[in-house]
Image (cartoon, rainbow, N blue to C red):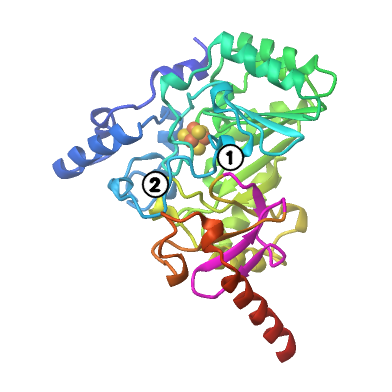
Amino acid sequence: MLQWIKQEKNAIRTVSELQEYINLSKKELSRLEEVCQTFQMKITPYYMDLIDKDDPNDPLKLLAIPNIKELNIKKGELDDPIGDTNEALGNQPEKALTHRYPDRVLLYPTPECGGYCRHCFRRRLAGKKEFQLTEKQMDTALKYIDDHKEIREVIFTGGDPLMLSDKRIDSILEAIHQMEHIVTIRIHTRMPVWNPYRLTDKLVSILKKYQPLWLVSHFNHPRELSETAIEHLNRLTDNGIPLLNQAVLLKGINDSVEIQRDLNWALIKARVKPYYLHQLDKARGISHFRVSIRKGMGMLRDLRGSIPGYAIPHYILDIPGGYGKIPMDYHYLNSDGNGLIIVETPFGELRPYIDGVDKKPDALENLETVHPLEVYSKSIKQKFEEVTEHDLQEN
Ligand code: SF4
């Protein structure tokens, strides 16, 4: 049996299986059962071996093992934080497509993942069988892509697209590769982290046929780049498949300049270009991982000078509701210094964003009941303009 399938079959999925590896009190046990009912657990034996079982705050443990804090849902957290299902923005949830930018489309072929990340932003669908695309649904999605000649790039995301069989991956990629208007394909996957054995010679030979094809991994901590992971990533680069990485900024995992520096050096050593560092999305039950934008921007500033420019990822916010990704820099942000940030979408629209976990500026007290754009009233806009004017005069 292939090693990656073995890992899949022997993955730890229940709290009683988890007990064989980690000491848990009776109270913890019952609460974890509850957590796993809201978002399931799956940890491969490979990843379990990377965890330091004796350290209660081991970052890899926090990334993989359910935590009762996930039952603590904060105000403003959403089922669909980045608006994948927001049809008003042109998305096609029934076809498993998100068509947010004219030239790119996201396709979710499967909800299955190699493991379930405790900070998952797509927990509304990850691991839920009803989101598995049937052949018919896939045909409809492919027809949509074929009909929309403005699309240049197809991005496979999930779930994890590499959970599909080699045969299925081959046939879907072939169909897309034949569309003349498609310039490139991108595959977002966390298999190199949960189960790097998935990057078999056979899979690499399939991916190689459909270049230009980019693979985007999702390493969050330098210790996830084990020798096994690097060995398997090298198979891809040796075969001409370029690798990018997107990490998420996570409290207790990688929210220090030192860890970010080590992570990005480790990626460069593994021939993976650090691409994005995401601000954590506002999904339900993950506030214990949240780091403020203010802190994130400070860290990114301090990273400059300690690692080469090409090793610094873009620090990105996916604006809640599906309004697009923006880089966290002062061209896109305007803050009142008290947790309220006004962000400018890629399409020039202004939207409010609450930084941090519990902060709620008075002006946004009714955010849940009022459309954010109504809340973002002229008076707030004026206030920011005045501050900017004032600051300019001061300087
Ligand atoms: S691989 Fe992606 S979709 Fe799956 S659990 Fe992790 S973050 Fe969620």
Q: Quadrant of residue 307?
A: bottom right
Secondary structure at numbered mark 2? helix
Q: Quadrant of residue 373?
A: bottom right
Which residue is under mark 1? 218
Secondary structure at numbered mark 1? loop
* Residue 124 seen by the camera: yes
Query: Residue at the location (43% across, 36% down)?
Result: 123
In the rendered view, does 324 fall on the left or right side of 110? right
Instruction: Find the magenta span and give its range.
Output: 322-347
Q: Is residue 340 one of those drawn in magenta? A: yes
User: Residue 120, how many percent across, how many down?
Assistant: 46, 40
Which residue is under mark 2? 62
CA gap between label 2 and label 1 equals: 16 Å
Relative to the observer, which residue lies in front, 90 or 19? 90
* Residue 21 seen by the camera: no
Q: Amino acid at mark 1?
A: His
Query: Residue at the location (41% across, 17% down)?
Result: 9
